[in-house]
Amino acid sequence: MGQESIVQSPESKVGLSNGPPILVLATRNPGKIVEISELLAGLDVRIRSLADYPDIGEIVEDGRTFAENAVKKATTVALETGELALADDSGLEVQALGGRPGILSNRYAPTPRERNERLLQELQDVEMALRTARFVCVAALADRQGHAVARTGFCEGRIALAPAGEAGFGYDPIFLLPDLGVTMAQLTCEEKNRISHRGKAFCAIREVLEHVLAEHGGLIPMP
Ligand code: ITT
């Protein structure tokens, strides 16, 4: 992609581009933005999201895996903005459903409430011992040359019999953490980040990001 097609950030447009590097979160999911911002706290970067780049259109998630989709989202946004970009592709795998909804977690039903209702309906005859599930998250970091690195995190649990809790987003109210006896939606953001798939993936990608910022001038070294 040529320089002329780069979508500028608000500060680049008004000549305020000096300062810590910009890191664009390549997501439109507000729940993810809250959690990821907390996971990146203390880094010497200026965090932006796609809300700051309204010219970037929908990125079609046509990969076969979480990793393919995460890398596609991160590289697309890094190339279009000319900045470092960090993407998250994530979802819920339910063992009794052969891993569904998996990479289609966001398209399983039109709204989060309907997705949870559909899942509870599909599992209505499945006993608690067989309601095992895991959240998966792939975090991908891409640089302005389109090179990308990805890290994966998992969180094991079960699908509850009924929703509980108001915090978090998506499937959190029906994702039971058997050791704690609560759903993910009954944890604070800090508690969720300590044990979640996203917390694990972003803790690992944060190490890569720190290295890239300190040693490589914002570029990911080629293997
Ligand atoms: P972006 O692509 O803009 O990041 P998205 O919501 O479309 O946002 P995904 O394609 O990665 O993101 O879909 C992930 C879906 O999986 C998400 O919408 C939720 O339904 C579910 N999900 C992922 N992480 C979750 C979490 O921590 N808690 C609850 N549900 C989660």
Image (cartoon, rainbow, N blue to C red):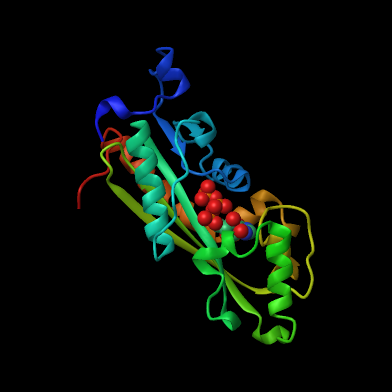
The extreme top residue here reads 14
Question: Front-most of 106 and 213?
Answer: 106
Where on the image, by quarter, is ligand 1?
Answer: bottom right
* Residue positioned most to the left: 223
Residue at image point 51% right, 29% down: 52
**With respect to residue 114, does 47 lie above or below?**
above
Q: In the image, is 51 to the left or to the right of 111?
A: left
In the picture, measured across the screen, residue 6 lies left or right of residue 47, that is left
Q: Residue placed at 75% from the left, 71% from the top?
A: 181
Residue 148 appears in view: yes
* Quarter holding residue 116: bottom right
Question: Residue 204: image x %, image y %?
Answer: 43, 54
Above or below for 105 versus 146? below
Percent x, y of residue 122:
69, 78
Which residue is painted at 40% across and 24% down in the image? 8
Q: Where does residue 92 sit, x and y in percent of width and height?
A: 57, 67
Q: Which of 103 and 84 is in front in this view?
A: 103
Residue 184 seen in this snapshot: no
Could you say which quadrant of the image residue 220 lies in? top left
Quadrant hosting residue 175: bottom right
Q: Judge whether 78 appears above or below 196 on screen.
A: above
**Quadrant showing the N terminus:** top left
Q: Where is residue 164 in the image (x, y as percent from the top left)?
A: 79, 63
Q: Residue at x 46, y 42 (%)?
A: 26
Q: Tell how many labels.
A: 0
